Amino acid sequence: MTSVAGAVRRRLHRLRLDRRPLPLVEVTVGPWVPGWVFRLAACVAVGALVLLAAGRTGLLPTIAVGAALLLAAWAAARPGPGPAHVAVVASAVILLGTGTTPFDAAVLWLAPLGYVAVRLGWWASWLGPLARVEVAALGRAAARDAVVVLATFPVALAAWVVAGRPVAALVVLGFVALAAFAWIIARRHDGR
């Protein structure tokens, strides 16, 4: 038993001493996007979401700008979906103060920006500032995200047309349509 172990050890030692040089390998990299672009875009999207929501209300501009800058700084310091989620909730709370009935139709055109802010936050959390992402790698996720964002606009346009008229049934129908669409698109989404 020990002679077998000794033979194996000698063989491994010889293999280490007789290493051959590694073959030359060529790697081509397609067009890429630097990681800092995602971080910058996430900061801008988070701040813009809060500012656009605050623009629909009589909220003091200093409070709105302060909240937007605070959330953008948080997104810059700790990139991730957390600041974007807080911005979405803050925007919803701000829009509750608009006083329009039955709801402010701006919610539907701010929803795509909220979705984009959350997705950019997710990408920023996984990429360092010096990282590079090939455009081909972004293709699949970008196609799905574009479908979600572009499908929201017709519903938002329809809601904008009937805004100010008491059509609560259409509001419920639009909410159900968006929830069903999001479930269909995102049900197989594993967070990537």
Image (tube, grey):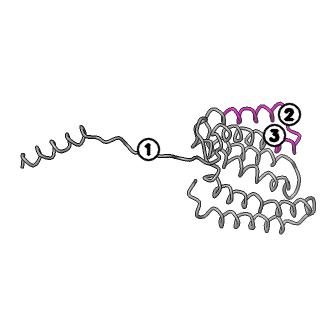
Which residue appears at 79% of the width and 65% of the height?
Answer: 174
Please identify the dominant SS of the magenta region.
helix
Chain-order first, disc 3 or disc 1 = 1
Q: Secondary structure at mark 3?
A: helix
Residue 45, how many percent across, how many down?
Answer: 74, 42
- Pick the front one: 135 or 121: 135
Q: Choose mark 3 or mark 2, whichever is in front.
A: 3
Q: Looking at the picture, how far across and down is residue 53, in whole percent?
A: 82, 45
Q: Position of residue 10 (x, y in %)?
A: 15, 42
The answer for how far apart the CA atoms under marks 3 and 2 are is 9 Å
Mark closest to the chain's N terminus, 1 or 2:
1
- C-alpha gap between disc 1 and disc 2: 60 Å
Question: Which of the numbered marks, if any, corresponds to residue 51?
Answer: 3
Secondary structure of residue under mark 1? loop
State the residue position of label 2: 61
In screen coordinates, is 192 left or right of 49? left
Mark 3 burial class by Cα count in 10 Å: few <14, some 14-19, many 20+: many
Label 3, label 1: how far apart the Cα atoms are: 53 Å
* Amino acid type at image mark 1: Leu
Label 1 neighbour load within 10 Å: few <14, some 14-19, many 20+: few
- Residue 164, image quadrant: bottom right
The reply to whether the C-beta atoms of the residues labelled 1 and 2 are less than 8 Å apart is no
Judging by the rendered image, the residue that carries numbered circle 1 is 24
Say what amino acid the circle numbered 3 marks.
Answer: Leu
Evaluate if marks 3 and 1 touch, with contact meaning CB atoms under 8 Å apart: no
Q: At which x and y percent is residue 166?
A: 91, 64
| Magenta residue span | 52-74
Q: How many marks?
A: 3
Q: Is residue 71 magenta?
A: yes
Asked if residue 55 is among those painted magenta in the image, a careful observer would answer yes
Q: Amino acid at mark 2?
A: Pro
The image quarter containing residue 39 is top right
